[in-house]
Image (cartoon, rainbow, N blue to C red):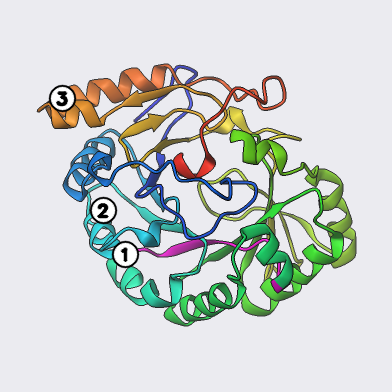
Amino acid sequence: MLLDGFGRRVDYLRLSVTDRCDLRCSYCMPEGFKGYQEPRDWLSFDEIERLLAVFARLGLKHIRLTGGEPLLRKSLPTLAQRLAALPGIEDLSLSTNGTQLAKHAARLHRAGVTRLNVSLDSLDRTRVRAICRRDALPQVLAGLEVARNEGFRPIKINMVALASTTDEDIAAMVAYCMARGFVLRLIETMPVGAAGRDAGFLDLHPVRERLRERFGLIDGVVAGGGPARYLVSPDGSFQIGFITPISQHFCETCNRVRLGVDGMLHLCLGQNDCVDFRTPLRAGGSDAELEQQLRSALQAKPWRHEFRERPQQVVRLMSSTGG
């Protein structure tokens, strides 16, 4: 079992497979950003598989493939198949912006990816274009239909709640998800990098209470390794989660770390602590040495973020951290 210095069990890894993205969402990446890492600095599939095998032997159970946009990494289904086969791994999922989903959904499902989180901040094409700085809505909606028909379950829609997001924007997304059997999750913006700090914050607590009354929702629980707090319809057919790192943080139950495509293990999204695994991998470090490094790293995992107290401290981009 992997335990951090506060006794929290860490069994969930968000694995970034690329820092590239084909969108430029206003809360994530500056429009003119060009500071990508060189592919030679990315972990190879062999390096990823070896390192995650070490993690799994120590208690890792859940892997989520992320980016950037993970579907831009060439041959990603091949990596997915290799990771799904690792002893100890019980769950392999993917977070995506959906633009490439129609093309890759079938191969990903066959490779062992069972769950999807798809970023979609509005159903209004003009608004999506303004947020993403790309005309992406038709591709995302098409990808979601392909994924639903392919049999991914559950499919969760991640909707970032910006200061300009209205109740009607959210109500339209609720109706869309209800009709298709998708789980909706509303997410507060986080001050990760200048883009995140400039996005504008919307407190989700009053939104939650308005939705509870408008749609007759009740408190509920949805299986998964994430931090969302859920409302559900009385018959259980619809679920909406609220991820509230700012208004009501969930650090006491944090069960995750993030591995960047460059091999840096980020111990907290809201802190700068990280540990380099690429160097020992390429220097011939043994599995025993990697195990010890991971155990030592988790002892340095902080108790909580400081988004409210020190919003300026995290300067890296969300897209380079694995979300």
Residue 192 in view (yes/no): no
Q: Secondary structure at mark 3?
A: helix
Q: Residues within 10 Å of mark 2 (few under 14, many from 20)?
A: many
> In the image, what residue type sits under mark 1?
Gly
Q: Which image quarter: residue 103?
A: bottom left
Based on the picture, tell me whether residue 120 belongs to the magenta stretch: yes
> Separation of disc 2 and disc 3 at Cα?
20 Å
Q: Residues within 10 Å of mark 1 (few under 14, many from 20)?
A: some
Residue 227 in view (yes/no): yes
Q: Residue at x 47, y 80 (%)?
A: 146
> Separation of disc 2 and disc 1 at Cα?
9 Å
Q: What residue did someone put label 2 on?
A: 83
Q: What residue did someone put label 3 on?
A: 288
Q: Pointer 3 and pointer 1: residues touching (CB < 8 Å)?
A: no
| Span of residues in magenta | 113-125
Left or right: 2 in relation to 236: left
Q: Which image quarter: residue 202?
A: top right
Q: Position of residue 139 (x, y in %)?
A: 53, 76
Q: Residue at x 40, y 41 (%)?
A: 13
Q: Secondary structure at mark 2?
A: helix
Mark sitting earlier along the chain (2/1): 2
